Amino acid sequence: MKALWNRSWPALLLLGAILLVWELAARAAGNPNVPPLSVVLQSLVDHDAAIAVAILQTLRRALIGLLIAIVTMIPLGILIGRIRWLGDLLEPVIDLLRPLPPPAVIPLVMLFAGIGDAAKIAVIVYTASFPILIHAIDGIRGTHPLLHTVSRAFRLRRAEAFWNVDLPATLPLVMTGLRLASAYAFLVAVTAEMLLSTDGIGVFLLRSQETFRIADGLAAICVIAAVGWCINAILLQLDRRLLHWHYATTAD
C-alpha cells in the first residue's frame, strides 16, 4: 500500500491542481455555461441516487459483454495462433472488421437484436473482443517453442496443454488486452446507451445535454471518469496477483 501511494501521490497532486484551477477559473469567468467544480459536486450530491442506479446499469452491461468476449476470444486467439490454416482463414476477416467503429455497427445490430439490452451487449462484445483476441494470438505465437515440445513430450492432451501451457504463456499479453478491452467496453456501453437505451449513465448524460443542465452532465462525466479509473486500478491489482510469477522474473 505504501509503495502504491509513493507512486501515486505526484499524479494525485497534479489532479488536485487541475481541479483547483477549474474551480478558480470558472468562478473568475462567471459564465453560467462553465460551472465551477463546487457546483458540479453539489449536482452530484443532489442526483446521487439517480446517478448510482444509472452507473450500475451501465456497469452491468459492460461486464456481461466483457465476460462474453473473454470466454470466447481467449480460446479462439490461442487456436488461431496455434493452427496455421485457421489463422490464414480468419485473420483477414479480423483485419477487415477490426477498424470498424462501434457506432457504425449499431444500425446492423438493431436489425437483428432490436434496441434492448441484447443489442447494447452485442456492440460491447464486438468492441471488447478484438483487443483480447489480438493479444491472445500474439501471446501464443510469442511463446518459446520449447514449451510446445515439452507438452508433446509429456503427451498432454489438447485440453491439458491449453490449461497448463498455452493459457499461462499467453496471460501476460492477454491481461494487457483485457485492460484495453475493459476500457473499451465501458466506453461503448455509455455510447450505446446514448443511442439505444432508456436507462444507464449514457442516457442520464444525454438528457442533461438536451435540457442544458450542464452541471448535471459534468457530474455524470466525473463519475464515468472515476469509475473508469477504479476499473483500471482493479485490473492492475488482478494482473499483479495472477502474474506474480511473471513479474518475479522481470524488472518491476
Image: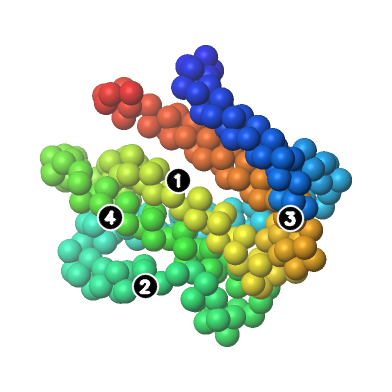
**Closest to the observer, 60 or 211:** 211
Nearest to viewer (mark 3 / mark 1): 3
Specify the quadrant of the image occupied by residue 156: top left
Q: Earlier in the sequence, mark 2 or mark 1?
A: 2
Taking the spot 33% from the left edge, 39% from the top edge, the residue there is: 172
User: Does residue 20 appear left or right of residue 75 in this picture?
Assistant: right
Q: Earlier in the sequence, mark 4 or mark 1?
A: 4
User: Does residue 199 appear left or right of residue 101 in this picture?
Assistant: right
Residue at which label 3 appears: 33
Identity of the amino acid at label 3? Asn
Q: Against 104, is 150 above or below?
A: above
- Residues packed near mark 2 inside 10 Å, few (<14), some (14 to 19) or many (20 plus): few
Q: Is residue 219 visible?
A: no
Taking the spot 74% from the left edge, 40% from the top edge, the residue there is: 27
Residue at which label 2 appears: 97
**Closest to the observer, 150 or 5:** 5
Identity of the amino acid at label 2? Leu
Q: How is the image coloured?
A: rainbow
Q: Against 220, is 113 above or below?
A: below
Distance from label 2 to label 4 (Cα)? 16 Å
User: Does residue 243 appear left or right of residue 215 in this picture?
Assistant: left
Res. 144 mark: none
Distance from label 2 to label 3 (Cα)? 40 Å
Task: State the SS at label 4.
Answer: helix
Identity of the amino acid at label 1? Arg
| Residues at circles 2 and 3 in contact by the CB criterion of under 8 Å | no
Specify the quadrant of the image occupied by residue 244: top left
Task: State the SS at label 2.
Answer: helix
- Residues packed near mark 3 inside 10 Å, few (<14), some (14 to 19) or many (20 plus): few
Please provide percent x and percent y for residue 51. Answer: 77, 51
